[in-house]
Amino acid sequence: MVKVTYVAHDGARVTVEAEPGESVMQAALSNDVEGIIGECGGAMMCATCHCYVDEAWEVGAGARAEGEEDMLEGAASEVTGRSRLSCQIKLAPELDGLVVHLPEEQL
């Protein structure tokens, strides 16, 4: 199992465990984490799973997938250099302890 901590805009933290291969979005939805909507189900057709990868995990989480930049243009909250679509971050053992911050709004 891989642990992921979601930090809400107000600072509240929720840590969940997920199977390797699941996306950060899937782990959030499976564990009822508020702040991730995932309207398109992970098809990279919306930006309702926008998150900010914690600075400590920026390199480990990898680069944005092809097309991810375009989808982030439609995000409801500010897009930064650490912005990612959580549906595009696949969990692996080396990401155990990953921390992502959630934006103020998704829609």
Image: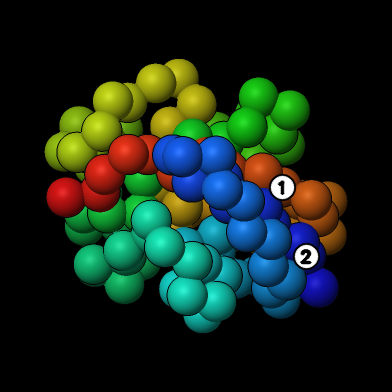
What residue is rendered at 31% in x and 72% in y? 41
Direction from residue 7 to residue 72 in the image, left or right: left
The x and y percentages for residue 52 are: 49, 35
Nearest the camera: 107 or 21?
107
| Whole-number angstrom distance, CA of label 2 to CA of label 1 | 8 Å
| Label 2 CA crowd tier, 10 Å (few <14, some 14–19, many 20+) | some
Mark 1: which secondary structure?
Answer: strand
Task: Name the residue beneath numbered marker 1.
Answer: 98
Direction from residue 30 to residue 59 in the image, left or right: right
What residue is rendered at 69% in x and 73% in y? 18
**Relative vertical location of residue 103 with respect to residue 55 in this rendering, above or below:** below
The x and y percentages for residue 83 are: 43, 32
Task: Name the residue beneath numbered marker 2.
Answer: 2
The x and y percentages for residue 44 are: 30, 56
Location of the N terminus by quadrant is: bottom right
Type of the residue with mark 1: Leu
Nearest the camera: 64 or 80?
80
Type of the residue with mark 2: Val
Q: Can residue 92 be seen in this view?
A: yes
In the rendered image, the residue lying farthest to the bottom is: 30
Whether residues under marks 2 and 1 lie with C-beta atoms below 8 angstroms apart, the answer is yes
What residue is rendered at 50% in x and 26% in y? 82
- Look at the image and name its color scheme: rainbow
What residue is rendered at 23% in x and 67% in y? 39
**Relative vertical location of residue 87 with respect to residue 41 in this rendering, above or below:** above
Mark 2: which secondary structure?
Answer: strand
* Mark seen at residue 64: none
Q: How many marks?
A: 2
**Earlier residue among tags 2 and 1:** 2
The x and y percentages for residue 94 are: 83, 51
Q: Can residue 62 be seen in this view?
A: no
